[in-house]
Image (tube, rainbow, N blue to C red):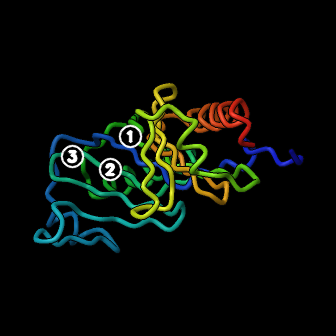
Amino acid sequence: MNEHKPEESLKIENIVASAKVTDSLDLPSLASQLKDAEYNKKRFPGVVLRMQDPKIAALVFGSGKVVLTGAKSIDSLSRGLQILADQLRALNIDIPEDLTYKIQNIVTSADLGTPINLNKIAVGFNLDKIEYEPEQFPGLVYRLDDPKVVVLLFGSGKLIITGGKVPEDAQRAVRRILSELSSLGLI
């Protein structure tokens, strides 16, 4: 195998996290006071705030809950939540100083650096953990238990790892896939 190290190709594509910033929010008032806020109750039950730096969307609900999406790193996720909190505080909304978020999903891409034969993998891997129907979807879906993630494998050798809760989940998943492919003689 060449010097390509799949673990080094890992790239976070999206982090989705949730947080509770307060007990309730007046969404129409919020939407009218915040620059660039989108609120259309018929289309979506929350206010959508799009930040440019970091490039994150905050979905703000009347319950005081927030979903942050689009973050490419844990640091940008934290900065996005802080920016949102500061914007709400500027409107005299009581927001705790130490906000915490819970990561719901980290989507990561990786590249094995070599094409792979999905048909052979489908035969070699544990059948109750995979889905492979090439006429419906060009990738093989592989559900891992440890880490608890779903890996989409493509014939090009590219991978998408979804369902992670910490960035290390993707690293562990790639190492496990490499180990299994190697033990089956498929890479």
Query: Which x, y percent locates residue 140?
Result: 50, 50
**In the rendered view, would you say 73 is above or below 26?**
above
Observer-nearest of 148 and 105: 148
Dot 3 and dot 2 residues touching (CB under 8 Å): no
The kind of residue on which mark 3 rests is Gly
Q: CA distance from mark 2 to mark 1?
A: 9 Å
Residue 67, numbered label:
2
Residue 64, numbered label:
3
Query: Which x, y percent locates residue 24?
Result: 15, 46
The kind of residue on which mark 1 rests is Gln
Q: Is residue 102 left or right of residue 73?
A: left
Q: Residue at x 18, y 65 (%)?
A: 44
Query: Which x, y percent locates residue 11?
Result: 64, 51
Q: Residue at x 25, y 69 (%)?
A: 33
Look at the numbered disc 2 and give the secondary structure of its residue.
strand
Q: CA distance from mark 3 to mark 2?
A: 10 Å
Observer-nearest of 12 and 20: 12
